[in-house]
Image (cartoon, helix red, strand yellow):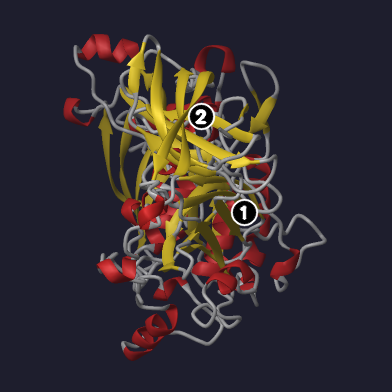
Amino acid sequence: MSKTVREIVAVAAAVGVFVTTGNIGLSIAAYQVTNAVTTAAFAKTPRPAQTGTALKTERPARISGYGRNRLFGAYVLYETAEDGTAVDVWAFHEGRIDAIEGYYLGDDKVTVLPNGFVAVGEDKRYGPNPDNIQVGANLGASPGVAWPQVMAKLPGVWTSAHRGDGVVTGFMLSKPVKAKNFQTTYATGGPNQTPLAIVARLQPVFDWRNPAQSVDDPATWTWSENAILHLAHYELVRNNKTWARHFLPTLSFWTAAANDCDVAMPLKAGGTEPRYRSCVTHRHAGDGSEHKAVVTAILACCDGWMAPRQDGALVVYSGRYYPPTVTIDARQIVSYTWETGIEDESAINEIPVTYISADHDFNAVDTDPWTDEDDISARGAVRSEQLENQVPSFAQARRLAKRKMAQDMAPKRGTCVTTSAGSVVIGQRFIMLDLTEGAGTPYAFTPYAGPVEITQLRRNLETGAVAFTWRAASAAIDEWNELTEEGRPAPKGEPVPVEPVATPTITTIAVVYTDVGSGDPAVGGQTSSGARLQIDAAGPDRDDLTWFARWRVGTSGPWSENDYADTLIGTGARFLTDFVPITDALQVQVAYSLGSGQLSDWSATTVVDTKR
């Protein structure tokens, strides 16, 4: 018997991993049950526990996410039940999610029936019976409920204590099947090679604009794709910011940015979509070093900007030009630098763009790159920089690419150091910068005067002086023409049509009798007669067919079945069965399988009288 979850928990506790009764967290998912369920195991060979095949993985990180996405899980249980059923349990997500919208087995989107069984596909995949594979997933409630289907298969191993509080978990039960059905039922190699995945609306987030929601009651929070709401949730829940100190004093900024994300942007095909959505999934930070990467990923979905104000409250802007309200000029400037133009090695004139596409099974796919054809012609070279934001729309990805190129190729940029009076720029994304020297004199010189975007800022705590980097800004960055600039989505290839498998027919059946025994009364011998069937069957003209025949007495009861080597006769086959029952109403059917593993339907029934 392979290692059980109870043993896993004991190991986890021994090495200091936080484990509590009834809470199987993602932190212990690395301690895998060590048996692999192989193709051979489903073909009635020794159970995995006897073969000793091992499943080894690194300790997985906890995963959480926003918006809508597809998630694969980390193994929590990997076991074989006494009846040969493969039992798998995964942990998908840390924290409650809003809804599960679909299931995948590997990269194959499947239909799950109300009872949890995976529907048989057009090519009989996951069949031939509609109860071979059963799956399920929960929403990560706390407290949770242990999976009763798993407890029934593994009594004493998986108990009511295995609730998985606050963790989205899922299970899959995969029945053993006959060798001839394996390729059809488990077309991608079996449950250990076809893990369960879920498509879900992920974490609910706090929307302070909704009076029905309370920051102190996460049960009132709702699901959203709004990137700024995702950012606020991450800072509150994962980065330990407090509502009263870090959000309330600057709530007007957060509201304006969230509203901007919801602005309806027209689409070339008609209709609209919200300006800025995100579908960011992230690992949980351990020592805090990953917080910056997650915040950056969310901000990138809305070309956002966030910085602490002098009182510590967070100021945020979405990707939109804001008219400056603060001016810095010679009265505050101590020193500055400025550059005109872009060095060739730093130039960007092409941005290849990806997005997360629901039409492509939530994979990252390419849309049209954003290019500056005039600059490419002038330089005589393509200077590319990839943009891989986790956004659900090619149009949004292109809008962000346009903004990035405008920012990276801003015609002027530089640095500025101010006196303590320059601290008014703290918490400002855009300011008016006037670098005029000698104003009002014949020697006046103005290298730049106009709106700029602050890209980095440092403050000297002893003197109050401020140093920042800047680049020229313009309201033109918000201009957008969906008819000429939206681009095209990634092409969606049509699935390869399933090769139809024709149903065979029985051409003729001849009963072949064989006498068994000596028949000599002197030695007590008796003679008995046995019947076999010579079947001529019609099917496709292929060399990779394996034929099957089955029979039963009457119209109910179990079928007897076997596979047979065939003798080709034209486009069909002829084979001789094993002995069959002697009866006047023997029901007979045939079927065949292709070399690919596809199994045909059984033929129409032929009733045979096998009495002599």
Secondary structure of the residue carrying tag 2 is strand
- Of residues 158 and 99, the one drawn nearer to the viewer in this rendering: 158
Residue 456 showing in the rendered view: yes
Which kind of residue does numbered mark 2 sit on?
Val
Quote the CA–CA distance across marks 1 and 2: 61 Å
- The residue located at (70%, 22%) in the rendering is 271
Percent of width and height locating residue 474: 48, 29
- The residue located at (43%, 78%) in the rendering is 5
Q: Which residue is mark 1?
A: 229
Which kind of residue does numbered mark 1 sit on?
Leu
Q: Is residue 205 above or below residue 227?
A: below
Q: Which mark is residue 464?
A: none
Classify 10 Å Cα crowding around label 2: few (below 14), some (14-19), many (20 and above). Answer: many
- The residue located at (75%, 65%) in the rendering is 220
Q: Which mark is residue 590?
A: 2
Please count the marks in the image: 2
Percent of width and height locating residue 95: 57, 67
Secondary structure of the residue carrying tag 1 is helix
